[in-house]
Image: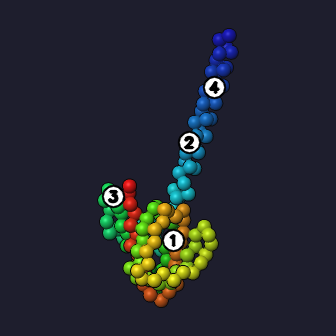
Amino acid sequence: MAQLFIAIFDGSMTLIKHTISVLGLLLVMGCGSQSHLPDPLKAGWKGQSVCIEVLNNKEVRILKCTFAPGIGHEKHFHAKHFGYTLAGSKFRIEDTTGIREVDVPTGTHFYSEGVDWHQVLNIGDSIAQFLIVEPKL
């Protein structure tokens, strides 16, 4: 009887160990597609930063991102944010929906619940600049 109990106990411990391993793997995988991509501040273009942090406190982070013609923003994710175009240009944007070219006029504003990933390239002939406001609520 004792040998049967030990065999059942050993089998149960093996099952528990496998369950913990699987749960750990699911937790890592479940952290979202963002976990392996940089945020807009850390993403740059060919090793150079394109965004600076204007403000970072307990309520909000504000970035200013600048793109000269021919400069882009490598693949990155965005948390929920509001954006305002300080200076517009024409962009090639690639994201989950494909590739498109978009004119972004000065004064344009937008709101997003978040972006899994995108990358952009300024294909216009003027310097573009954006403010990105990320709430921390």
Q: How crowded is mark 3: few (under 14 residues within 10 Å), some or many (20 or more)?
A: few
Task: Provide residue 131's location: percent of width, then percent of height.
Answer: 38, 73
Residue at the (49%, 77%) spot, across then down: 72
Task: Provide residue 6's location: percent of width, then percent of height.
Answer: 64, 17
Q: How crowded is mark 2: few (under 14 residues within 10 Å), some or many (20 or more)?
A: few
The earlier-in-sequence mark between 3 and 1 is 3
The earlier-in-sequence mark between 2 and 1 is 2
Closer mark to the observer between disc 3 and disc 1: 3
Tag of residue 74 = 1
The residue furthest bottom is: 125
Q: Distance between the residues labelled 4 and 1?
A: 48 Å
Q: How crowded is mark 1: few (under 14 residues within 10 Å), some or many (20 or more)?
A: many
For the C terminus, the image quarter is bottom left
For the N terminus, the image quarter is top right
Is 41 on the left-hand or right-hand side of 95?
left
According to the picture, the residue beneath numbered tag 3 turns out to be 59
Q: Distance between the residues labelled 3 and 1?
A: 27 Å
According to the picture, the residue beneath numbered tag 4 turns out to be 12
The earlier-in-sequence mark between 4 and 2 is 4
The earlier-in-sequence mark between 4 and 3 is 4
- Amino acid under label 2? Gly
Q: How crowded is mark 4: few (under 14 residues within 10 Å), some or many (20 or more)?
A: few
Query: Looking at the picture, does residue 121 appear above or below residue 111?
Result: below
According to the picture, the residue beneath numbered tag 2 turns out to be 24
- Amino acid under label 1? Glu
- At mark 1, the secondary structure is strand
Query: Looking at the picture, does residue 88 appear above or below residue 40?
Result: below
Is 88 on the left-hand or right-hand side of 5?
left
